[in-house]
Amino acid sequence: MPKTGLYLLQGISPAQVAASPFDVRVIDAYDEDGTLWTRDQVTQMGGGSADPHLLLGYFSIGEAETYRDYFKTIPASALGPENPQWKGNFEVAYWTDAWRQVATTYVDNLIKAGYDGAYFDVVDEYQTAWAKSHVADPAQAMADLVKYLADHARAQNPNFKIWVNNAEELLTKDTYFNAIDGMFKENLYYTDSGQKQPSDETAHSLGLMNKMLAAGKDVIAIEYVSGSDKVADVHAQADRDGLGSYVAHLDLDGIDYEGVRPGVGAPTNPAEPASPAPADPVTGPDAPIAGTPSTPAPEDGTERGTDERPGAHHHRHDGHSGGEDPLASLDDSFVFRGSDEACGSGRGSHRSGEVDAGLDPMGLYLQHGWGSHHHGHHDAA
């Protein structure tokens, strides 16, 4: 039976994640203050062999994020242009030893913290013009990096899983295909604006991902829609195609229960709400743009409003309040906390960083491609 998925990069509550009914749970390794989740919290959220849920720690494998501590260790020669859609995110020379060292230590810390696996985002960075101009075969270079990290992780924990986001064209490379255990595919059926994807694009992606299904590897469709009709359509199409599914908030802030599949169930801990109660409306210049993720979905099937600004800002946090020291068992030289320079960089809309104030955020976001057939981002230099 296809697995259900959760994709959560902001508004993470360990108790809420633990109570959620999803088989595969992808979370950022930091809390809202930029502090690592403790090993106890990771276990609570589903990490470890005693829990049947699969807990995956997020890592952007194709872009370097300024608010991670590793950023200051990357030589300038290994950094490419800043992502114009998200300030604080830079293309990185992922084929270099410098980035391999960063990625290796990041994965090491996920293993030490007790995650069941790693989730690699921005795998499709190999499609950018900058990557193509700097390495002879950028697709193979990405495949090689994923295989290296998978081999490295499994040498320490043979059960450690590697999941990826999008980039289904790489599945044609056995080096890559054999290294991964599962994948998420965003916007397979609907665009971010709630329009149906062209049928030929959906068919193209499914044709590539059928290789995963034939090998017994899970694929979970992530869609950003609202309204009972569209939610039901997502699940029906995923069932038809043998995929899992999750309907999410566009900024991946808080668990979305509107799209829980029939029969999957509500949170198992009714004492704690699934998401924070909405705050009183804010007016004036500080009012949210186009609504907030907690806005109830309309009944007419129209799209939920989303805050187009980045989410939580991450400041350096050098202490914690009681409990286990979250850094005690981790590499002292690489604790991937948030940095002072990075306040103003959030993890909203899948990619961290701040939207350029001089550009229309939603217009930019809708240009962003999830998979090689969406060329708004990947054809940019």
Image (cartoon, rainbow, N blue to C red):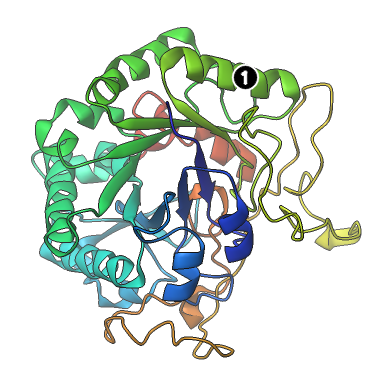
Relative vertical location of residue 67 with respect to residue 290 in this rendering, above or below: below
Q: Could you tell me which secondary element the residue under label 1 belongs to?
A: loop
Residue that numbered label 1 is attached to? 195
Comparing 49 with 306, the one in front is 49
Residue 13 visible to the viewer:
no
Q: Is residue 54 above or below residue 188?
A: below
Q: How many marks?
A: 1
- Find the residue positioned furthest to the front: 50
Q: Amino acid at mark 1?
A: Gln
Q: Is residue 116 left or right of residue 340?
A: left
Q: Looking at the image, is 320 positioned above or below residue 233?
A: below
Where residue 339 appears, as percent x and y from the top left, is 46, 79
Q: Position of residue 350 (x, y in %)?
A: 50, 48
Q: Quadrant of residue 322?
A: bottom right
Kindly give the residue lying farthest to the top in the view shown: 200
Give the quarter of the figure containing the C terminus: top left
Give residue 120's position: percent from left, percent from top.
33, 49
Of 172 and 344, nearer the camera is 172
